[in-house]
Every structure is written in structure tokens, then in C-alpha cells.
Image (cartoon, rainbow, N blue to C red):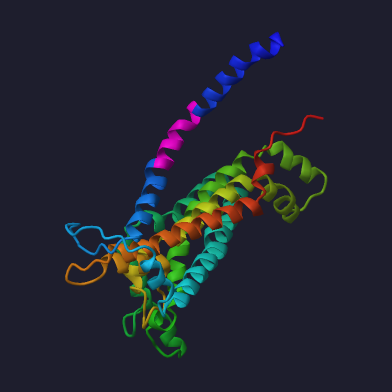
Amino acid sequence: MVAETRGRPRRRRRRLTAFGFLAPALVLVVAFYLIPAVLTLVLSLTDLSSANFTKPWNFIGLENYRRLFSDAFFPKILRNTLFYVFVTLGLFNVGLALVLALTSTAIPRRAGFLFRMLWLLPRITPSVIYIMMWVRIAQQPPFGIINQLLGPLGVEGKNWLFETPWLFVILTNGFVGASFGMIIFTSALEAIPRDVLTAARVDGASRWRLIRDMQIPLIKWPLLFVATYQTMSLLTSFEYILLLTEGGPGLFTTEVWALTSYKRALGTYFGNNQWGYGAAWGFVLVVIGFVFSLIYVRIFRFNQLVREPLIE
């Protein structure tokens, strides 16, 4: 009984210490996620449409959400968003990033550093210049680089951006996203003890077996982080799509959810900004992102990742 009483202050100090270390992250989450999400929800329940917030906030309940889900283009925008997120995520932000990390860590260190540096160029290039380069590549004849290369081969020139808009939307976003995952995965792969890999090679493990059975299982944490973070990033990103296609060509061809929210809230005329309606689109996106986070935690078995190792 006495020992239990003496142990309580110690446990209390441990909890306070743990909360102390978590406090900075908690403050950031509350300030930059929870409070904005609550404000977005409150705003979505109003009919606010004034550009300078001079008009009163009239609460209209779920009217904006009724209007959203009854929008004729709601299914198309949802399909566009899911297609854009999962194709870009799977092929580039996680898939290509992992290939680049494995490749650059399998070659000499200096060559790997140069290789990764080249792949960082799309990320550090200003957005407008980066998109102008892609527009120049896909431009209609006689200016487009693709047309200039394919012309001598007898291929008819065309506006490739207009013909295959999704291809260029995914490429422009994918090359930028792949560089982020490449750096995270490279750091994780470099942290794996060399003795473990050497022992596996001595036992006769092939390169493919090393990747499949050792390296990838040992970087589950980075995989979880990159998949979750890049999914949230893709759900909320629209900058390159706005600069490249503005959601076209045509009617909502490459329009994604975040771009629709931006246009509903800000992309209208005569100061009628429809803040409330745009906020409704934005808050639904917050819910979608939260659901995806829960799915990733389930897929990657988060509880097992954070569980203390068993001592045999």
C-alpha cells in the first residue's frame, strides 16, 4: 500500500513530462487545424457572400450542404478528385519515390546525391515557371516540343495538353510529389543497419528479396507518413491544376474538390464570393481527409507500430 502511494507521484510526473513534450505539437494542431476546421464549419452554415465581411452572418443551417450534394457536377468532381489523388499517389508520390530512393541508395553515395538533387529541381522551381515549361512542352504546333520531336517521325501535331489533360496534370504534380517521398524514404533506408543487410546477403538473399522482405518492412513508419501526408496534400492542392488547365479543358474535365471550393468561395464576379458555400465544400474535404487518415492507420496497423517491443 505504501509502495503504491509512493509510486503515484512518480507516475504523475511521467504523465506531465509526456504531456510537456506533446504540448508544442498539440498547440500547433489546435491553432492550425482544429480552430480553422471549426471556423470553416461555422462559416459553412451561413450565407456569407460579402468580399469584405461587411454583411451580417445569417445562419441558414444545412442549406449549403443541400446545395452542394444536389449540384449536377458533384459526382464528376468527386470522381476527378479520387482519380487524381490515387493515381498520382500510387504512381509517383509513393511508387516512384520509393523506386528513386532504392535506386539512389544502391549506387555510390556521391552519384546518389547528384541523382536526388536533380529530382529536387521540380520542387524548387517556382510554380509559374514550372507550369510554363510544361505548357511549352505540350503546346500546339509548330511550337510544342513534343510536336517538334514527333513531327519528323510522321506523327500529326496536336495540342497535347488539350487532348490528354489528365496525363499532364498527373505528371506535373507527380514529379513534385515524388521528390518529397524520395527524401523521406532515402533517410529511412540509410538508417537501416548495414550489418542486417550484409547478413542477409551472406545467407544468399537476392536484391529483390532484400527489398521485399527486409527494406520495405523496416520502413513502414515512413511509408505511413508519406502516404498519409501526400494524400492530404493532394486532396487540398489545386495550384498546378489552376495554372495548367483551370479545371478544363471543357466543363470540369480536370476540376478537383479543392479547386471547386476555391472557385465557389473566391472565383466569382462583382464581389459575390459565396464564402459560405465554398466553406461547405472545404469542410466536406476536411471530413474526407480525416476518413482517409483513419483508413491508413488501419491498413498500416498503427497500434502494432507504436507498441513496445516484446522482450523474450
**Where residue 70 sits in the image (x, y, percent)?**
42, 76
**Where residue 100 sits in the image (x, y, percent)?**
56, 56
Q: Residue at x 48, y 58 (%)?
A: 287
Q: Is residue 310 left or right of residue 220?
A: right
Q: Tell me the quarter of the picture where residue 163 sits.
A: bottom left
Q: Residue at x 35, y 57 (%)?
A: 125
Which of the pair 284/110 is nearer the observer? 284
Q: Residue at x 42, y 78 (%)?
A: 73
- Stretch of the chain drawn in magenta: 20-30
The C terminus lies in quadrant: top right
The N terminus lies in quadrant: top right
Which of the pair 266/93 is nearer the observer? 266
Residue 198 in sight = yes
**Where residue 103 sits in the image (x, y, percent)?**
60, 54
Q: Residue at x 18, y 59 (%)?
A: 55
User: Is residue 136 inside the magenta stretch?
Assistant: no
Residue 178 in sight = no
Q: Is residue 90 above or below residue 293?
A: below
Which of the pair 18/173 is nearer the observer? 18
Q: Tell me the quarter of the picture where residue 202 sits.
A: top right
Predominant SS along the magenta part: helix
Q: Is residue 62 above or below residue 150?
A: above
**Where residue 116 sits in the image (x, y, percent)?**
49, 51
User: Is residue 23 inside the magenta stretch?
Assistant: yes
Q: Is residue 229 above or below residue 194?
A: below
- Please state the total of marks drawn on the protein image: 0
Q: Tell me the quarter of the picture where residue 32 sits.
A: top left
